[in-house]
Image: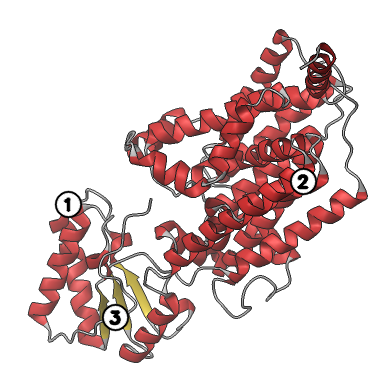
Amino acid sequence: MTATDRDGSAGRQARAHAPRGPARLAAADLAVAALLAGAAAMLTAATAFGRVYTGDGSYLGAMTADLARADWRYHNALYLPAAWLCAQVVPAGWLAVADDPLALGKATSAAACGLGAAASFLCCRLFRAARWAALAAAALLVVTPAVWFFGSAIEVHAVHFAVVAVVALATLALPWRRPVLAAAAAAILFVVPCVSHQTAPLLGPGWILLVQCARRRVGRGFAPVGLLAVGAGLLAAVGVAHVLVQWRRGLGFGADPAGVAATVDGWYRGFAPSLLRSEVLEPFALLVPLALVACAWRALDPWLRACAATTLLTTLAGVLWWGVPERGGYLLGGAFVLAALVAALWSALPRRVAVAAEALVLAAQAALGWRDVRAFDAGGFQLADRVARVRQHVGPGGVLLSCTELSPAVSLWLPDVSEHSLVASLQQGAPIDAWLATVEPLALAFVAAGPVALELGYRGRADLPANMVQAMERLEAALRRAWRATDQPDASWPRRLRAPR
């Protein structure tokens, strides 16, 4: 290589790292974002699950089935407002079958997936990625197993993904030529994702560097003292968000760090090596090696690489330390930076090479995402099968005693059937004898009054606490002793449900 060649290469790298004039969103960018949002929403709506993901999915499905009676004190405080907004904006039947009781829950996840993808695309553009590279990176994000899965499930993670991506976009678009005003606005905006989900404070260190990236779009970045001030503003935002959530839950305007600590400790499981597979490698698949290459490639903007690496590492460290498996759901808040990294990587490659690589990676990732969502939905306990079985064996005026929480109340589909969840009435660690003393006479009274079905879902659960399984076994034995029982095997139940990963 000649000296001129070396100088040219160094010059190109210097130009890649140096601040340039602000990237602006053109009308074409907004049009592409709208088309991407629609395509992503329709994709995930088309693959919406016929079963629910864990008991939280049942709870959220029931609340969105009747927002007027929902408990708006739910701790992920933006979920129900997002569902309400979806009901106002998305016409009935567009993203879910209109007469499905769970239509709004399904539509909310699909719409959130589309909005998060569109905002991620626009973030990539503001990070100066080429339009074609930004579109390919955002599309890759949509078909990533974790994003596709939670876009198809009734859960909070798709909404949180959208909230964080939209707030990141708004932060990048602030008037950073007036840094004090923009930094204050960025701190206020950071309240929103912290209200959305309890994992959002883990984004804080990376968000400081996101602010630095935003400032460098229009000029010189903040000095270290300025970044400390930005961090202080974001920390204050976390405190404000905590107080707002407390108020939203009906607990008044006040801080309760002990309550937060108790929640964290109550669910704490600790690190296990399998979490790297279940929370990172499988849910994000090909995005993992692409992100590693992008973070290590010095030709890319160092501030973008630092922002992405910090965002991903802090959230990952929190998830691995806590040890609660969620199929990558707790990492979705920072997913927009994965798209930004990949878009920057592809923009830096020769276009012909990048396009060929994009096509291969996108096809492979889509295959992995499709396999993941189909495998989950084929795992058993389809809600339609459950409704048909209850209609057949219980009928109008009957009672269903359910030993699982993997479905909202069957009365959403069959108003003449009364369902009583036994799992919901038994707190983890509660004395079994005291519970049986209350529940057994009630169950026997139901049986004496008319047809009753006891749904033995606990038998197939690998994730229920031992005391719950023991309690259900003892109640089932008591009912069999007192009354004649007829077993009706349900083909939709798997032999044994795996614990959620």
Distance from Cα at disc 1 to Cα at disc 3: 30 Å
Residue 34 picture quarter: bottom right
Q: Which residue in the structure is indicated by mark 1? A: 431
Residue drawn where x is 75% and y is 64% of the image: 89
Q: Are marks 1 and 2 in contact (CB under 8 Å)?
A: no
- Which callout, 3 or 2, points to the residue nearer the camera? 2
Residue 119 shows in the view: no
* Amino acid, disc 3: Asp
> With respect to residue 131, does 459 lie above or below?
below
* Amino acid, disc 1: Pro
- Which callout, 1 or 2, points to the residue nearer the camera? 2
The dot on residue 261 is none
Q: Which residue in the structure is indicated by mark 2? A: 352
Residue drawn where x is 55% and y is 63% of the image: 152
Distance from Cα at disc 1 to Cα at disc 2: 66 Å
Q: Secondary structure at mark 1?
A: loop
Q: Position of residue 42 (x, y in %)?
A: 67, 67
* Amino acid, disc 2: Arg
Residue drawn where x is 79% and y is 38% of the image: 129
The dot on residue 490 is 3
